[in-house]
Image (cartoon, grey):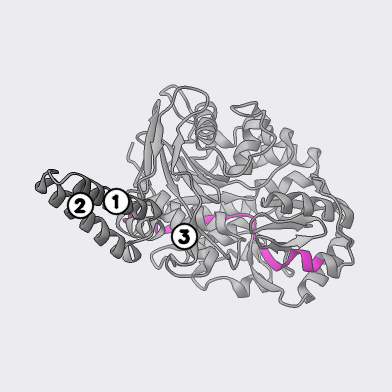
């Protein structure tokens, strides 16, 4: 607005100067300049009622988002489920009499000291992560303290249960949920979710969610933005013990879509267990009929050998779609020595060109980007705080402009706890201009708020980019990725081959 005001002032001075210093200055020019000044003045007066960029994007999404021609009505979801205990991270650690210190990442937590150092490491980055806590008795003591901490809340937890719960909000969708379901979780699940009897167990698996807000401090550490730190001692989910039950339930349920999650939980069980179990998982997943698409939801992992096994043992090629965030995307590239794998971590908002390079590499390495490939992977839903990208192999998926928009819209709604985007509570953090590649000559794209989905093509892969309207003061960050993936799937459809 200040630029408009400066231009109006400069124009007014110019009119006065030319008119008084040169009486011969054409009157028609004076009238033209005066009219221009009046128009600028009107714009300035009306600027207070002009839509903000957030309002423009939100309204554009509402127009863009349309239901697919063919919608899923029966979705099977498994296999990691639990009860989330959500507490204030710094407050709980202080209640456990843990002193602040310096951050250090641990792949597996063996003690409260490991917990403290890893929590600080990720809080200072403002990054989400998930860890396995190896000491059962120590974890149970921490879990009791968390449940009794003032303000502690209990929610449906685990990627599968969260995705199932989100899908069940659509009245046209029936959800089969398979995973370790105890009494508390069963009480929290939506009524329209079907749980096989074989999945029910006498006790719940608990996951502790340590949340922090932007600006939260502990000692010399401060969080740059809101996020959460998750840890658990979860053996049922860690061994994917209900996977066979899950696949066995499909013959009777006859799903149109399968959503699989929980592979990351096996990482903390030790190499000997996950090597054998991963092979069994591939055989079991392969029993799902070929005509039923499979979406795999990934989560935080730290063992490069394990990540390589997921790729090497043909997990990625036997699923049709995957969902992941910026940490998981970069870790896949680091494990497989892909594009930009030399980056230790993202610095601020992940560069769109670098993200695009890695997405294309994954689809070319593990997907069906050529006619000779026998892989099934044709879709990746990438989400980070500031923006989302859907990358799909041409000819396999439809309605992806709606899908990526719906995923971004639900992120702003769920974080703020609102049914619709509240433009006063969100802010745009996505880049307004970006490159589509950093590895090769790419395009420079500009975001138009009135048309907030930017589309580009690389080889036979289409990329759909849209910003996120980030909640300024999020009420809850847990499960955002699961809600995003679920919403994106609801608006997606497989193209007929």
**SS type, badge 2:** helix
Circles 1 and 2: CB atoms closer than 8 Å = no
Do the residues under discs 3 and 1 have CB atoms within 8 angstroms?
A: no
Mark 1 Cα-neighbour bin, 10 Å: few <14, some 14–19, many ≥20 = few
Look at 80% across and 68% down and name the residue there. Answer: 92
* Mark 2–mark 3 distance (CA, rounded to whole Å): 43 Å
Asked which secondary structure carries label 1, the reply is helix
Which marked residue is nearer to the observer: mark 3 or mark 1? 1
Which numbered circle lies on residue 376? none
Tell me, for residue 13, which label it has, or none.
1
Which residues make up the magenta segment?
66-92
Q: Where is residue 473 in the image (x, y as percent from the top left)?
A: 58, 65
> Which residue is denoted by mark 2 in the rendering?
36
Q: Where is residue 215 in the image (x, y as percent from the top left)?
A: 68, 60
Q: Nearer the viewer, residue 481 or 286?
A: 481
The quadrant where residue 296 appears: top right
- Residue 410 numbered mark, or none: 3
């Amino acid at each position: 607005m200040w630029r408009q005001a400066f231009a109006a002032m400069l124009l007014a001075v110019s009119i006065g100067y030319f008119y008084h210093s040169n009486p011969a200055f054409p009157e028609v020019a004076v009238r033209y300049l005066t009219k221009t000044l009046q128009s600028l003045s009107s714009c300035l007066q009306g600027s207070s009622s002009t839509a903000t960029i957030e309002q423009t994007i939100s309204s554009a999404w509402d127009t863009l988002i349309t239901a697919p021609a063919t919608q899923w009505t029966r979705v099977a979801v498994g296999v990691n489920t639990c009860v989330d205990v959500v507490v204030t991270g710094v407050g709980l650690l202080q209640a456990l009499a843990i002193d602040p210190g310096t951050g250090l990442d641990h792949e597996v937590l063996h003690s409260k000291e490991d917990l403290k150092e890893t929590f600080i490491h990720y809080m200072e980055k403002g990054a989400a992560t998930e860890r396995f806590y190896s000491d059962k008795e120590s974890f149970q003591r921490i879990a009791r303290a968390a449940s009794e901490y003032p303000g502690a809340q209990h929610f449906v937890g685990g990627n599968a249960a969260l995705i199932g719960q989100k899908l069940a909000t659509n009245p046209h969708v029936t959800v089969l949920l398979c995973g370790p379901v105890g009494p508390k979780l069963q009480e929290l699940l939506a009524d329209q979710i079907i749980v096989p009897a074989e999945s029910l167990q006498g006790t719940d698996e608990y996951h502790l969610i340590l949340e922090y807000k932007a600006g939260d401090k502990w000692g010399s550490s401060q969080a740059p933005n809101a996020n959460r730190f998750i840890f658990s001692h979860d053996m049922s989910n860690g061994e994917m013990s209900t996977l066979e039950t899950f696949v066995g339930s499909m013959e009777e349920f006859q799903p149109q879509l399968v959503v699989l999650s929980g592979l990351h939980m096996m990482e903390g069980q030790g190499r000997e267990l996950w090597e054998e179990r991963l092979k069994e998982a591939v055989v079991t997943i392969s029993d799902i009929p070929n005509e039923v698409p499979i979406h795999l939801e990934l989560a935080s992992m730290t063992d490069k050998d394990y990540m390589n096994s997921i790729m090497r043992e043909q997990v990625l090629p036997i699923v049709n779609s995957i969902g992941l965030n910026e940490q998981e995307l970069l870790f896949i590239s680091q494990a497989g020595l892909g594009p930009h794998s030399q980056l230790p971590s993202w610095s601020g908002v992940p560069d769109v060109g670098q993200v695009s390079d890695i997405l294309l590499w994954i689809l070319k390495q593990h997907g069906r980007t050529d006619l000779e490939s026998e892989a099934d992977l044709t879709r990746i839903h990438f989400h980070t705080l500031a923006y989302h990208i859907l990358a799909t192999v041409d000819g396999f998926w439809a309605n992806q402009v709606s899908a990526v928009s719906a995923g971004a819209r639900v992120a702003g709604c769920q974080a703020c706890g609102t049914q619709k985007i509240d433009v006063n509570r969100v802010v745009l953090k996505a880049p307004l201009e970006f490159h589509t590649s950093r590895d090769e000559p790419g395009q420079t794209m500009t975001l138009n708020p009135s048309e907030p989905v930017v589309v580009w093509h690389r080889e036979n892969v289409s990329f759909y980019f849209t910003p996120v309207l980030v909640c300024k003061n999020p009420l809850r960050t847990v499960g955002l990725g699961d809600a995003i993936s679920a919403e994106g799937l609801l608006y997606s459809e497989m193209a007929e081959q």
